[in-house]
Image: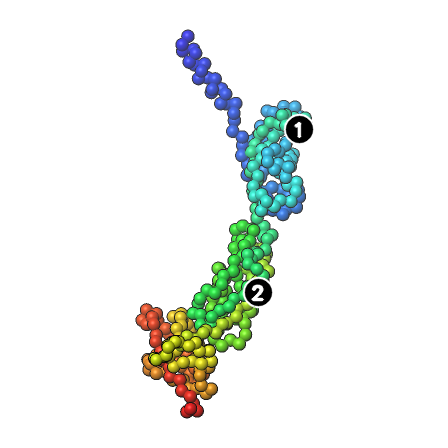
Amino acid sequence: MIWGIFLCCLLKPAAGFQTQERLPFFHGHVFENSPTASKVNGLSIPVRRINAQKWCPVSGMHFKLYGNGSEDFRAFAHHKRGNILLKTSRVLDREARSEYLLSVGVCCQTCVSESVVSPVATVKVDVLDTNDHEPTFRSADTVHITLDDTTALRSVVYRLQAVDADSGNNAELTYMSVPNNGSFYVVPKTGEVLLVDSILGLPSKVKFYVFARDHGWPSLTSKGVLVTISPQRWATRPAELTGSGRGARWPRALLDPGTVVSLNVSEDASVGSVITSLSPSRFPSAAYELVFPESESSPVAVGRDSGDITISSMLDRETEPVLELTVKIQDKRGV
Protein backbone atom coordinates (compact mmCIF):
# COMPACT_ATOMS: atom_id res chain seq x y z
CA MET A 1 0.00 0.00 0.00
CA ILE A 2 2.79 2.42 0.85
CA TRP A 3 4.62 1.86 -2.44
CA GLY A 4 1.45 2.31 -4.45
CA ILE A 5 0.76 5.73 -2.98
CA PHE A 6 4.33 6.80 -3.60
CA LEU A 7 4.16 5.87 -7.28
CA CYS A 8 0.90 7.72 -7.77
CA CYS A 9 2.45 10.90 -6.39
CA LEU A 10 5.32 10.66 -8.84
CA LEU A 11 3.25 9.86 -11.89
CA LYS A 12 0.77 12.71 -11.60
CA PRO A 13 3.27 15.63 -11.93
CA ALA A 14 4.99 13.85 -14.79
CA ALA A 15 1.74 13.45 -16.66
CA GLY A 16 0.88 17.10 -16.06
CA PHE A 17 4.26 18.22 -17.35
CA GLN A 18 3.78 16.47 -20.66
CA THR A 19 0.63 18.45 -21.37
CA GLN A 20 2.57 21.76 -21.30
CA GLU A 21 4.53 21.56 -24.54
CA ARG A 22 6.87 24.36 -25.49
CA LEU A 23 5.48 26.38 -28.40
CA PRO A 24 7.62 26.69 -31.55
CA PHE A 25 9.38 30.08 -31.82
CA PHE A 26 9.79 32.01 -35.09
CA HIS A 27 11.61 35.27 -35.84
CA GLY A 28 11.18 37.78 -38.69
CA HIS A 29 11.67 41.42 -39.60
CA VAL A 30 10.17 44.24 -41.64
CA PHE A 31 11.47 47.71 -42.48
CA GLU A 32 9.69 50.71 -41.05
CA ASN A 33 7.70 52.89 -43.47
CA SER A 34 7.01 49.84 -45.65
CA PRO A 35 3.57 50.07 -47.30
CA THR A 36 0.60 48.26 -45.84
CA ALA A 37 0.44 44.52 -46.70
CA SER A 38 4.23 44.19 -46.75
CA LYS A 39 5.38 40.66 -45.95
CA VAL A 40 7.39 40.03 -42.79
CA ASN A 41 10.74 38.84 -44.13
CA GLY A 42 12.56 35.80 -42.79
CA LEU A 43 9.37 34.42 -41.28
CA SER A 44 7.73 31.28 -42.64
CA ILE A 45 5.89 28.96 -40.26
CA PRO A 46 5.42 25.41 -41.61
CA VAL A 47 1.94 24.16 -40.81
CA ARG A 48 3.36 20.75 -39.95
CA ARG A 49 5.46 22.34 -37.17
CA ILE A 50 2.37 23.48 -35.28
CA ASN A 51 0.47 20.22 -35.79
CA ALA A 52 -2.72 22.13 -36.58
CA GLN A 53 -4.66 18.97 -37.42
CA LYS A 54 -4.51 18.08 -33.74
CA TRP A 55 -6.65 21.13 -32.96
CA CYS A 56 -8.99 21.04 -35.94
CA PRO A 57 -9.42 17.50 -37.27
CA VAL A 58 -12.31 18.76 -39.37
CA SER A 59 -11.82 21.36 -42.14
CA GLY A 60 -12.42 25.00 -41.34
CA MET A 61 -9.16 25.87 -39.57
CA HIS A 62 -8.30 29.58 -39.19
CA PHE A 63 -5.18 31.38 -37.89
CA LYS A 64 -5.30 34.38 -35.63
CA LEU A 65 -2.66 36.66 -34.07
CA TYR A 66 -3.04 37.92 -30.54
CA GLY A 67 -0.88 39.85 -28.13
CA ASN A 68 0.11 43.50 -27.71
CA GLY A 69 0.19 45.08 -31.18
CA SER A 70 -1.33 42.10 -32.99
CA GLU A 71 -3.66 44.46 -34.84
CA ASP A 72 -0.63 45.75 -36.79
CA PHE A 73 -0.29 42.39 -38.60
CA ARG A 74 -2.44 39.68 -40.12
CA ALA A 75 -1.67 35.99 -40.57
CA PHE A 76 -2.60 33.94 -43.62
CA ALA A 77 -1.82 30.46 -44.89
CA HIS A 78 0.06 29.94 -48.13
CA HIS A 79 -1.76 26.85 -49.36
CA LYS A 80 0.71 25.96 -52.13
CA ARG A 81 3.71 26.01 -49.81
CA GLY A 82 1.95 24.88 -46.67
CA ASN A 83 3.30 27.83 -44.66
CA ILE A 84 1.85 30.56 -42.47
CA LEU A 85 3.00 34.08 -43.38
CA LEU A 86 2.56 37.50 -41.76
CA LYS A 87 1.82 40.81 -43.45
CA THR A 88 1.55 44.30 -42.03
CA SER A 89 -1.85 45.91 -41.69
CA ARG A 90 -0.49 49.46 -41.45
CA VAL A 91 2.72 51.48 -41.94
CA LEU A 92 5.07 50.87 -39.00
CA ASP A 93 7.35 53.37 -37.28
CA ARG A 94 10.47 52.01 -35.57
CA GLU A 95 10.86 55.11 -33.40
CA ALA A 96 7.38 54.41 -31.98
CA ARG A 97 7.92 50.65 -31.60
CA SER A 98 10.94 48.55 -32.54
CA GLU A 99 9.72 44.97 -31.91
CA TYR A 100 6.62 42.82 -31.42
CA LEU A 101 6.20 39.56 -29.51
CA LEU A 102 3.03 37.84 -30.69
CA SER A 103 1.32 34.48 -30.53
CA VAL A 104 -0.25 32.55 -33.38
CA GLY A 105 -3.50 30.83 -32.53
CA VAL A 106 -5.66 28.29 -34.32
CA CYS A 107 -9.44 28.35 -34.20
CA CYS A 108 -11.81 25.95 -35.86
CA GLN A 109 -14.72 27.04 -38.04
CA THR A 110 -14.76 30.59 -36.59
CA CYS A 111 -12.59 32.94 -34.50
CA VAL A 112 -15.38 34.97 -32.94
CA SER A 113 -14.32 34.42 -29.33
CA GLU A 114 -10.85 34.47 -27.79
CA SER A 115 -11.74 31.41 -25.77
CA VAL A 116 -11.83 29.20 -28.85
CA VAL A 117 -8.28 30.19 -29.93
CA SER A 118 -5.54 27.67 -29.12
CA PRO A 119 -1.91 28.97 -29.14
CA VAL A 120 0.35 27.02 -31.51
CA ALA A 121 3.44 29.27 -32.00
CA THR A 122 5.26 32.36 -30.75
CA VAL A 123 6.50 35.02 -33.18
CA LYS A 124 8.93 37.92 -32.74
CA VAL A 125 8.97 40.68 -35.37
CA ASP A 126 11.75 43.29 -35.46
CA VAL A 127 11.02 46.66 -37.08
CA LEU A 128 14.23 47.70 -38.84
CA ASP A 129 15.37 51.28 -39.19
CA THR A 130 15.33 53.34 -42.38
CA ASN A 131 16.99 56.71 -42.77
CA ASP A 132 13.86 58.82 -42.39
CA HIS A 133 15.03 61.49 -39.90
CA GLU A 134 17.44 64.30 -40.71
CA PRO A 135 19.90 65.49 -38.05
CA THR A 136 18.89 68.47 -35.94
CA PHE A 137 21.02 70.80 -33.84
CA ARG A 138 20.28 71.35 -30.17
CA SER A 139 21.47 74.95 -30.32
CA ALA A 140 19.71 77.92 -31.90
CA ASP A 141 19.84 78.68 -35.62
CA THR A 142 22.48 81.35 -35.02
CA VAL A 143 25.53 81.45 -32.75
CA HIS A 144 27.43 84.65 -31.92
CA ILE A 145 30.94 84.42 -30.43
CA THR A 146 33.24 87.22 -29.30
CA LEU A 147 36.83 85.97 -29.38
CA ASP A 148 40.03 87.57 -28.11
CA ASP A 149 42.31 88.06 -31.11
CA THR A 150 45.27 86.72 -29.10
CA THR A 151 43.58 83.36 -28.44
CA ALA A 152 46.03 80.48 -28.81
CA LEU A 153 45.88 78.50 -32.02
CA ARG A 154 44.04 75.15 -31.89
CA SER A 155 41.84 76.43 -29.09
CA VAL A 156 38.28 75.08 -29.06
CA VAL A 157 36.14 78.20 -29.30
CA TYR A 158 32.76 76.45 -29.54
CA ARG A 159 31.14 73.06 -29.97
CA LEU A 160 27.97 72.27 -31.87
CA GLN A 161 26.05 69.05 -31.31
CA ALA A 162 23.34 67.52 -33.45
CA VAL A 163 21.10 64.52 -32.79
CA ASP A 164 19.46 61.98 -35.10
CA ALA A 165 16.40 59.93 -34.13
CA ASP A 166 17.48 57.02 -36.33
CA SER A 167 19.82 54.22 -35.24
CA GLY A 168 23.05 52.56 -36.39
CA ASN A 169 24.83 54.18 -39.33
CA ASN A 170 21.74 56.29 -39.94
CA ALA A 171 22.46 58.11 -36.66
CA GLU A 172 26.24 58.54 -37.09
CA LEU A 173 27.01 62.16 -37.98
CA THR A 174 29.73 64.14 -39.72
CA TYR A 175 30.05 67.91 -39.25
CA MET A 176 31.20 70.37 -41.91
CA SER A 177 31.40 74.12 -42.46
CA VAL A 178 30.40 76.16 -45.52
CA PRO A 179 32.11 78.16 -46.85
CA ASN A 180 35.59 77.07 -45.82
CA ASN A 181 37.68 79.74 -44.16
CA GLY A 182 41.34 79.85 -43.21
CA SER A 183 40.82 80.90 -39.59
CA PHE A 184 38.45 78.26 -38.19
CA TYR A 185 38.05 74.53 -38.70
CA VAL A 186 35.11 72.32 -37.72
CA VAL A 187 36.18 68.85 -36.54
CA PRO A 188 34.08 66.36 -38.58
CA LYS A 189 33.57 63.83 -35.77
CA THR A 190 32.95 66.14 -32.80
CA GLY A 191 31.55 69.41 -34.16
CA GLU A 192 34.23 71.40 -32.31
CA VAL A 193 35.18 74.76 -33.82
CA LEU A 194 38.97 75.25 -33.67
CA LEU A 195 41.01 78.39 -34.21
CA VAL A 196 43.67 77.34 -36.74
CA ASP A 197 45.10 80.67 -37.89
CA SER A 198 45.66 84.09 -36.40
CA ILE A 199 42.73 86.50 -36.42
CA LEU A 200 44.81 89.54 -35.49
CA GLY A 201 43.86 92.59 -37.42
CA LEU A 202 40.81 91.06 -39.09
CA PRO A 203 38.69 94.04 -40.09
CA SER A 204 35.36 92.23 -40.04
CA LYS A 205 33.50 89.32 -38.51
CA VAL A 206 33.97 85.75 -39.67
CA LYS A 207 30.74 84.04 -40.74
CA PHE A 208 30.13 80.46 -41.82
CA TYR A 209 27.45 77.76 -41.63
CA VAL A 210 27.84 74.42 -39.86
CA PHE A 211 25.91 71.38 -41.10
CA ALA A 212 25.55 67.79 -39.83
CA ARG A 213 25.19 64.90 -42.27
CA ASP A 214 24.32 61.31 -41.36
CA HIS A 215 25.86 58.12 -42.77
CA GLY A 216 22.60 56.59 -43.99
CA TRP A 217 21.57 55.96 -47.57
CA PRO A 218 20.59 58.24 -48.99
CA SER A 219 22.31 60.56 -46.53
CA LEU A 220 20.36 63.41 -44.96
CA THR A 221 21.74 66.82 -44.01
CA SER A 222 20.57 69.12 -41.24
CA LYS A 223 19.63 72.74 -41.55
CA GLY A 224 22.65 75.01 -41.19
CA VAL A 225 23.61 76.91 -38.05
CA LEU A 226 25.05 80.35 -38.78
CA VAL A 227 28.20 80.95 -36.72
CA THR A 228 29.41 84.54 -36.39
CA ILE A 229 32.78 85.16 -34.69
CA SER A 230 33.81 88.72 -33.82
CA PRO A 231 37.54 89.18 -33.11
CA GLN A 232 38.10 91.38 -30.05
CA ARG A 233 41.35 93.31 -29.77
CA TRP A 234 43.31 92.59 -26.62
CA ALA A 235 43.58 95.35 -24.00
CA THR A 236 47.03 96.40 -22.82
CA ARG A 237 47.80 96.83 -19.15
CA PRO A 238 50.67 99.32 -18.62
CA ALA A 239 53.00 98.64 -15.73
CA GLU A 240 53.34 101.23 -13.01
CA LEU A 241 56.11 103.74 -13.66
CA THR A 242 58.72 104.42 -11.01
CA GLY A 243 57.66 107.36 -8.87
CA SER A 244 54.10 107.21 -10.10
CA GLY A 245 51.45 107.18 -7.45
CA ARG A 246 49.10 105.00 -9.52
CA GLY A 247 49.11 102.92 -12.65
CA ALA A 248 47.14 104.84 -15.27
CA ARG A 249 45.33 102.85 -18.01
CA TRP A 250 46.46 103.81 -21.46
CA PRO A 251 44.23 103.50 -24.51
CA ARG A 252 45.13 100.78 -27.00
CA ALA A 253 46.60 103.32 -29.39
CA LEU A 254 49.38 104.03 -26.87
CA LEU A 255 51.97 101.49 -25.74
CA ASP A 256 53.81 102.57 -22.62
CA PRO A 257 57.55 101.78 -22.48
CA GLY A 258 56.85 99.57 -19.47
CA THR A 259 53.98 97.65 -21.05
CA VAL A 260 54.03 93.88 -20.55
CA VAL A 261 52.04 91.78 -23.00
CA SER A 262 51.35 88.10 -22.20
CA LEU A 263 50.30 85.73 -24.97
CA ASN A 264 49.50 82.03 -25.23
CA VAL A 265 50.65 80.37 -28.43
CA SER A 266 50.34 76.73 -29.50
CA GLU A 267 53.62 74.95 -30.25
CA ASP A 268 51.95 73.67 -33.43
CA ALA A 269 51.55 77.19 -34.80
CA SER A 270 52.87 77.28 -38.35
CA VAL A 271 55.92 79.25 -39.41
CA GLY A 272 54.86 82.62 -40.77
CA SER A 273 51.86 82.97 -38.47
CA VAL A 274 51.39 86.41 -36.93
CA ILE A 275 51.14 86.06 -33.15
CA THR A 276 50.22 89.64 -32.41
CA SER A 277 50.92 93.19 -33.53
CA LEU A 278 52.42 96.00 -31.47
CA SER A 279 51.05 98.62 -33.81
CA PRO A 280 49.74 101.23 -33.30
CA SER A 281 52.20 102.59 -30.79
CA ARG A 282 52.30 105.95 -29.07
CA PHE A 283 54.22 107.36 -32.04
CA PRO A 284 52.52 108.34 -35.30
CA SER A 285 55.46 106.83 -37.20
CA ALA A 286 57.28 104.10 -35.28
CA ALA A 287 60.13 101.68 -35.89
CA TYR A 288 60.27 98.35 -34.04
CA GLU A 289 63.43 96.48 -33.08
CA LEU A 290 63.90 93.15 -31.29
CA VAL A 291 66.40 93.82 -28.50
CA PHE A 292 66.29 90.48 -26.66
CA PRO A 293 66.95 87.77 -27.57
CA GLU A 294 69.08 88.32 -30.63
CA SER A 295 67.21 87.86 -33.85
CA GLU A 296 69.53 85.01 -34.95
CA SER A 297 68.54 82.84 -31.97
CA SER A 298 64.91 83.90 -31.60
CA PRO A 299 62.08 81.72 -32.99
CA VAL A 300 60.06 84.87 -33.67
CA ALA A 301 60.71 87.99 -35.68
CA VAL A 302 59.45 91.54 -35.26
CA GLY A 303 58.49 93.57 -38.31
CA ARG A 304 60.43 96.82 -38.30
CA ASP A 305 57.65 98.92 -39.81
CA SER A 306 54.52 96.89 -39.00
CA GLY A 307 55.27 95.80 -35.43
CA ASP A 308 53.97 92.31 -36.24
CA ILE A 309 55.46 89.49 -34.17
CA THR A 310 55.76 86.53 -36.54
CA ILE A 311 56.86 82.93 -35.96
CA SER A 312 60.13 82.40 -37.86
CA SER A 313 60.94 78.82 -36.73
CA MET A 314 59.11 75.91 -35.13
CA LEU A 315 58.20 76.27 -31.45
CA ASP A 316 58.95 73.52 -28.92
CA ARG A 317 57.25 73.70 -25.55
CA GLU A 318 59.48 71.00 -24.01
CA THR A 319 62.66 72.88 -24.93
CA GLU A 320 61.46 76.42 -24.24
CA PRO A 321 58.04 76.64 -22.55
CA VAL A 322 58.29 80.41 -22.00
CA LEU A 323 59.78 82.94 -24.39
CA GLU A 324 60.51 86.47 -23.22
CA LEU A 325 60.97 89.26 -25.73
CA THR A 326 62.07 92.84 -25.38
CA VAL A 327 61.06 95.13 -28.22
CA LYS A 328 62.33 98.66 -28.63
CA ILE A 329 59.96 101.19 -30.21
CA GLN A 330 61.35 104.42 -31.63
CA ASP A 331 59.86 107.43 -33.32
CA LYS A 332 61.07 107.54 -36.91
CA ARG A 333 60.79 111.32 -36.92
CA GLY A 334 63.32 111.53 -34.09
CA VAL A 335 60.95 113.51 -31.90
The residue under label 2 is 226
| Residue 157 against residue 272 in the figure, above or below | above
Say which quarter of the image contains residue 153: bottom left
31 relative to 234, above or below: above
Q: Quadrant of residue 215?
A: bottom right
Residue 268 seen in render: no
Q: Position of residue 330 (x, y in %)?
A: 40, 87
Mark 2 residue crowding within 10 angstroms, few (<14) / some (14–19) / many (20+): some
Model colouring: rainbow
Give the CA separation, mark 2 to mark 1.
61 Å
Residue that numbered label 1 is attached to: 111
Q: Residue furthest left?
A: 319
Q: Quadrant of the C terminus?
A: bottom left
- Residue at horizontal 62%, vertical 44%? 92
In the drawing, does residue 183 fall left or right of residue 60? Answer: left
Picture layout, residue 214 above or below residue 10: below
Badge 2 amino acid: Leu
Which amino acid does the dot numbered 1 rest on?
Cys
Q: Residue at x 52, y 68 (%)?
A: 229
Q: Camera-side residue: 134 or 14? A: 134
Residue 36: x percent and y percent?
66, 43
The first of marks 2 and 1 along the sequence is: 1
Q: Residue shown at 34%/80% (left/top)?
A: 243
Element carrying mark 2: strand
Residue at (40, 72) in percent of width and height = 263
Q: Residue furthest top?
A: 1
